Amino acid sequence: MMKAGALLVGLTFAMASSGESRNEQEHACRGDAFRFCARAIPNKEKIKACMKQHYDELSPPCKALFDPPTTDDPKS
């Protein structure tokens, strides 16, 4: 299960950004994905959504793979 989860996490981040290789993306975000979003594995859409929810907590290399959240949230 861990190997499958790690592979899915890597594939998820491969879709998140085209400027980095898959190995770089997986390395940058693997720890964050398991720390914040382990419950979402193996659902790639849930992993991406979860990582975006934790954007401010992501490590800098992983954060660089995601667009910053928009500030036009009506709840803000």
Image (tube, helix red, strand yellow):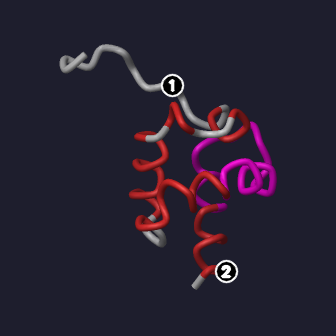
Residue at 80% x, 50% y: name it. 24
Q: Is residue 24 above or below residue 8?
A: above
Q: Which residues are magenta?
A: 10-30
**SS state under label 1:** loop
Tell me which corner region of the image, top left, top right, bottom left or bottom right, holds residue 19: top right
Q: Earlier in the sequence, mark 2 or mark 1?
A: 2
- Residue drawn at (66%, 39%) of the image: 59
Q: Is residue 34 left or right of residue 21?
A: left
Q: Does residue 48 appear left or right of residue 60 in this picture?
A: left
Identified at 46% across, 40% down, the residue is 54
Residue 28: image location, x then y, percent: 73, 48
Name the kind of residue labelled 1 in the image.
Answer: Pro
Q: Quadrant of the C terminus?
A: top left
Most extreme residue toward the left, as rendered? 74
Q: Is residue 18 magenta?
A: yes
Rendered image: mark on residue 68? 1
Q: Is residue 11 above or below residue 29?
A: below
The disc label shown at residue 3, or none: 2
Horizontal and vertical percent for residue 2? 62, 80
Quarter containing the N terminus: bottom right
Determine whether, in the image, residue 67 is placed left or right of residue 74: right
Please tell me whether mark 2 sits on a helix, a strand or a loop: helix
